Every structure is written in C-alpha cells, then in structure tokens.
Image (cartoon, grey):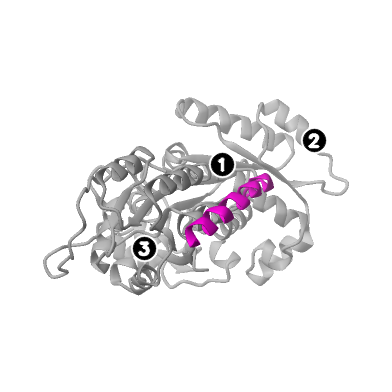
C-alpha cells in the first residue's frame, strides 16, 4: 500500500457537480469490499458515471476480512476500497494482514463510521491512501478516487514493458501478444499492446481485429493527439485488453525522429496501468529510445549462435544505458526443433549470465492454429504446457512466481473467526 496521502480529517461534504471539476479516472481496476447494502449500492451506482467509464469496478461483500481472504491467493488491483464498521483496533489488525498481500502500487481507500483523528493517523501510518467517513455522497466518492490519480505530484500510472526480438523471425511479436493477453487476464489489469512495426505489424491479425485507425494516426498527427483521440484509436479485444494496431501497409515511409513516440507514451502512461510495446527488430534512434525508456525490457531469442550474439549485444548496450534499472529479461523461443542443432538453454543462459524467465518449445501446430484463427494460444488449448509457461512468464514480469502460495490459506481460519466475532 502506498503512502501518498490526501490529508483530510473531516467528513467529506456533498459535492456540487455544477461548481466542482472532477477529473476522469484512468484505466484502472477497482475492487470494493462492502459491509452494508447502502455503500455497495452507492458504489454500483457510480459505475456508469462519465468520469468512471474507463475504470473497471467489482463490488464484493465481506469488508476488510473479505479483502484479506480474497488477496491471500490472488493479485491485488490498482485500487481497493474497503468499508469497515469494525472497532479501530480490529480494522488496523485486518489492514496489517492485508498489507502482507498488497502488490507495490496498490492504493487503499477506507470507508468507515468513526470520525476519529487518531484512527486516521493510524491508517495513514499504514499507507492507506484516504479515509472517508460515511455516509458519503456519490460525487464526493468519485472525487476522492479521482484525486488519488489526478492530484499534482502523482507519478505516472502506467508501467511499460518493451518486448524485442534478438533477431528477425524469432517470434517476439507472438510472445508479446500472448504474454500481454495472459497478464491482462490473470492480473485483472487494463493492458494495451502497442504495435510499433508500422509496415509489417501483426497485432491486428493475431487478435482478429481490423481497426479503421492505427498508431500511424497518432504518430503522424502529434498536434491532434489527446486522450479522446487515443480512445478512438484503440481497438478493444477484451474488457481488460486493447490494442494500438499498426497500419501494416507500405503506402508511405516510416522514418521517424528519435522523439516521435514521446507524446503517445506520455498519454499511455497517464491513463493505462500496463503497456506492452511490441518493438520491431530494428536499431534506430527511436527504437533505442523506447527500449531505454521502458520500465522493463524483454528480449526474445531462438537458441542459436546469432540469437546469442545479438542478445548479448542488446543486454550489454541496455545495461550501460540503464545503470539504475534491472537487467533485461530473456525468453528463449522455439526450442527443441526436430533435427536442428541448437544451443542448450542452460548453456545459452550461462553465456549471457542471465536466467531466462521462460523457454517455449517449438509447437508449430498449436501456434499455427492460433495465428490462423486470430486467437491466443491459451484460447486454443488452455491446458497445454505452453499456456502454463506463458502464464508463468506473465507472473514473473509482474514480480511473482505464481498467483499466491497455497500456504497462505492458513490465514483463512483467522479470517473466519474475525467474521464470526463481528457477526456476534
């Protein structure tokens, strides 16, 4: 839980929508855990508000104990809203348990009935983003959430992961699309895939989409680019996944200045939690800028000598250009091709002094069927080993090896006792 606090000691007054400007929320995932029908109904009623249309909201019962139980075995969303009518000591104890499971960047807002400055300070000390005394007005609630992301000094929302192939034909785009699809599904986080191969990009084909507009409209008309234009350019694949497709036409030249994508990236970072860049296998000023500026870089390579050499060059170059960032991640694709000599995965990793986050075997039937159908591998065969590997890669990029260790279920009896105690 973050410690970015909007200091508020008094109850929130009702907001007059005619005099107060409330900024729209970005594409975030919100989950609310309520104890009363009044609060759950209030939250459900704001889902269709024009300022909330980009956010994805789910309402659950159970309060703080329900949140602890839910996230002991699942990733946390961008924002958790908890209604709690418990005694202050019990609420603080429940939040201490919840803090064990909160991923970095998750914000927490508490709705309670105690107008107690001591409690407020206890919550602030534990990283709670805001505390609202109920009953709360609908617009006041929206304003509270909006200010968490729109207030001055708030950092960029979006995390950028750039995926690039060590050489042409190594399947980097296919891996990027499948991993992005998996991450959006398993993390319940809004995700956008940006296809930066304007002449030959395959994102539209892989997701069976034929959008009338593309990333070219943003890059060639930067003076017109704003949040509304970006929304028009995006093509939705699922509730949580959108694509910014390439035009994939050759009627113009795609020679860009180094800063050509800067405006687009600023907009994406400000509005979307997860951005996957499908960077083509080229070495230009703008492609280098995209890789150096990303939060994480993933290199996809085949297990051969050219892939090894190019991967080492990329890793060394990016390490020098990003001295304070983590090293690039490595995925080895198309292993175990019949009758083809190749470098063993262990030897490949040893030569680069980096452990791959995944190794994906050569399965032409599975990948070919998915490509021809405009589907992801997991949609064709969700139980395949490759689907499991892709999910594992997604979890590794999110900073965890699995959803949650099963030993965390030891907490469930305690949660049940807390519920019974409150009910009595």
- The residue located at (28%, 61%) in the rendering is 134
Residue 169 in view: no
Label placed on residue 344 = 2
Q: Residue furthest front?
A: 424
Mark 3 element type: helix
* The residue stretch that appears in magenta: 403-424
What's the CA distance linking mark 1 and mark 2?
26 Å
Q: Secondary structure at mark 1?
A: loop
Task: Using a 10 Å C-alpha cutoff, classify the residue at mark 2 as few (fewer than 14 neighbours), some (14 to 19) or many (20 or more).
Answer: few
Q: Position of residue 166 (x, y in %)?
A: 62, 40
Q: Disc 2 vs disc 3: Cβ atoms closer than 8 Å?
A: no
Q: Residue furthest right?
A: 339
**Pointer 1: what residue?**
399
Q: Looking at the image, tell me whether mark 1 or mark 2 is earlier in sequence order.
A: 2
Instruction: Check the image and name the residue furthest to the left.
Output: 19
Callout 3 environment at 10 Å: few (<14), some (14 to 19), or many (20+)?
A: some
Label 1 Cα neighbours within 10 Å, binned few <14 / some 14-19 / many ≥20:
few
User: Label 3 to label 1, Cα distance in Å?
Assistant: 34 Å
Task: Tell me which corner region of the image, top left, top right, bottom left or bottom right, holds residue 124.
Answer: top left
Rendered location of residue 28, percent (x, y): 41, 58
Give the residue at mark 3: 217
Is 80 colored magenta in this rendering?
no
């Amino acid at each position: 839980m973050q410690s970015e606090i909007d200091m508020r000691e008094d109850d929130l007054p009702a907001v007059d929508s005619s005099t107060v400007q409330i900024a729209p929320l970005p594409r975030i995932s919100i989950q609310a855990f309520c104890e009363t029908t009044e609060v759950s109904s209030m939250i459900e009623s704001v889902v269709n508000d024009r300022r909330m249309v980009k956010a994805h909201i789910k309402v659950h019962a159970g309060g703080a104990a329900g949140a602890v139980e839910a996230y002991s075995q699942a990733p946390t969303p961008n924002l958790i809203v908890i209604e709690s009518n418990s005694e202050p000591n019990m609420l603080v104890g429940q939040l201490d348990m919840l803090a064990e499971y909160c991923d970095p960047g998750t914000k927490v807002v508490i709705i309670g009935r105690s107008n107690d400055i001591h409690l407020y300070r206890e919550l602030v000390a534990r990283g709670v983003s805001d505390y609202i005394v109920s009953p709360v007005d609908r617009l006041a609630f929206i304003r509270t959430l909006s200010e968490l992301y729109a207030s001055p000094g708030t950092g960029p929302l979006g995390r950028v992961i750039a995926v690039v192939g060590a050489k042409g034909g190594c399947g980097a785009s296919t891996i990027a699309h499948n991993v992005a699809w998996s991450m959006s599904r398993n993390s319940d986080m809004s995700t956008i895939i940006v296809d930066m191969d304007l002449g030959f990009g395959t994102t539209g084909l892989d997701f069976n989409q034929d959008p009338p507009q593309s990333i070219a409209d943003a890059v060639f008309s930067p003076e017109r680019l704003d949040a509304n234009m970006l929304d028009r350019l995006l093509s939705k694949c699922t509730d949580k996944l959108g694509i910014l497709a390439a035009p994939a036409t050759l009627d113009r030249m795609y020679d860009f200045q180094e800063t050509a994508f800067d405006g687009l990236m600023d907009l994406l970072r400000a509005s979307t939690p997860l951005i996957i860049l499908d960077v083509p296998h080229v070495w230009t000023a703008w492609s280098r800028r995209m890789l150096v500026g990303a939060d994480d870089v993933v290199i996809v390579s085949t297990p051969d000598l050219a892939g090894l050499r190019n991967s080492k060059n990329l890793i060394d170059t990016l390490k020098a250009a990003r001295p304070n960032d983590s090293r690039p991640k490595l995925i080895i694709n198309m292993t175990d091709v019949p009758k083809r000599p190749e470098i063993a995965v262990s030897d490949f990793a040893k030569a680069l002094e980096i452990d791959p986050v995944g190794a994906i075997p050569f399965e032409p039937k599975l990948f070919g069927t998915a490509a021809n159908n405009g589907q992801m591998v997991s949609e064709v065969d969700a139980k395949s080993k490759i689907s499991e590997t892709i999910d594992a890669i997604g979890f590794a990029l999110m900073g965890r090896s699995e959803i949650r260790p099963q030993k965390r279920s030891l907490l469930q009896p305690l949660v049940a006792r807390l519920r019974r105690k409150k009910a009595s």
